[in-house]
Image (cartoon, rainbow, N blue to C red):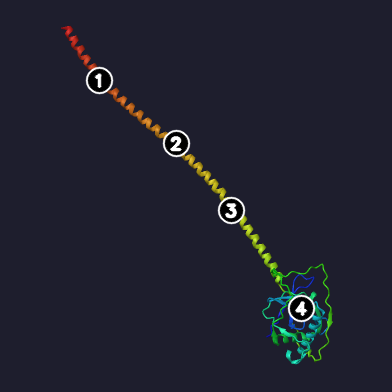
Amino acid sequence: MMLLRTLVLERGGQDAPVNGALLCGFAVAQAASNFLVYSLDEEMEPGSSRVYIAALRKKHDRYFLSGVDAKEDLQAAMHVFKQILMVAAGSGAKAGGVEASVPYHFIDLKGCKLPPARPEDHHSVIIKKALVMKVITLGMSAPVLPAIESASLIVPSIRFSSQMTSPPKDVDPPQPVEQPLPDPPVEVIPQCAVVAPPVQPVVHAQMDHASLVEVDSTLTNLARVAQELTHQKLAITERESMLEQWHARLRQEQGTMDERSRELDQRAATLDTRALEVSQKTQEQARMTAHLSQLQSSLRGVLAELDQSLEG
């Protein structure tokens, strides 16, 4: 089973990026440049497909895509791509089986991170649709060498965000010039060719939007919970304040009751003292009454004796 490598593409007027099928990448020593060929599975007419050629610059294990600016480099890339089409259209011939007028080699793109591509900036050509999968198969089976380092490329010192942004919608991008390539001099059997699967839109932007919605919902729930906790804390604080006021009132009433109890104790002690005094006075009065009774008896005796002496 052959795994088809895809390339993230950004198209003008579309918010969501799409995936393109990567046909091959090759280096041309004559132009000291690397080139990348990819397809969006665009069928211009029955049996034909549009593919794009972009300049692939390498610097310090980082890759950059751009348009082919120099006319000589574009001619060299187109000539080499024609050679690749001729080899791919052959009956299983390898890249070294045909003598190339312009030296080239396929480059190893395994494990490298390719930046998003803009088809509006790249050159496009029209080839037979049956050759698309054959070029992909050839690029995967042919020997590969490292890409050519770009000495003139200045790598930015800042780190770009991995988030892809859509190009401005109010600017009309220049339309690429389509140049149909002549059919290679090898007969192609379109019935047995396998067409690259249609590209599917990537869901990175939708995932980011869903993640933002989920984060926003989570933050809203947390804010609501925090507000509820704040209300509960205020209610508990009010209840604690009321309980403290009740405790203070109880302590005040307890102090009043203690003071009244002390007053009652003092009054009871005073009453006990007065009762003791009254008891003592009563006893004293009883003694005095008994003494008076004795005096009265003595006085009667004396009077009786006096009466007897007077009569005698």
Residue contact between numbered discs 2 and 4, judged by CB atoms under 8 Å:
no
**CA distance separating discs 2 and 4:** 102 Å
Pick the front one: 258 or 216: 216
At label 1, the amino acid type is His
**CA distance separating discs 1 and 4:** 150 Å
Vertically, is 175 above or below 300? below
Q: Quadrant of residue 296?
A: top left
Report the number of discs: 4
Pick the front one: 93 or 258: 93
Q: Which residue is mark 4?
A: 55
At label 4, the amino acid type is Ala
Relative side of 164 to 226, left or right: right
| Badge number at residue 259 | 2
Q: Residue at x 35, y 29 (%)?
A: 273
Assign a secondary structure to mark 3: helix
Q: Residue at x 70, y 71 (%)?
A: 204
**CA distance separating discs 4 and 3:** 65 Å
**CA distance separating discs 1 and 3:** 88 Å
Query: Neighbour class for label 4 at 10 Å: few (<14), some, many (≥20)?
Result: many
Q: Quadrant of residue 119?
A: bottom right
Residue contact between numbered discs 2 and 1, judged by CB atoms under 8 Å:
no
Q: Is residue 70 visible?
A: yes
Residue 282 in the image: state x and y as whole percent: 31, 25
Q: Which residue is mark 3?
A: 232
Query: Neighbour class for label 2 at 10 Å: few (<14), some, many (≥20)?
Result: few
Q: Which residue is mark 1?
A: 291
Instruction: Say which label, 1 or 3, has the lower sequence index.
Output: 3
Instruction: Say which label, 4 or 3, has the lower sequence index.
Output: 4
Query: Neighbour class for label 3 at 10 Å: few (<14), some, many (≥20)?
Result: few
Assign a secondary structure to mark 4: strand
Vertically, is 89 above or below 277? below
Vertically, is 141 above or below 299? below
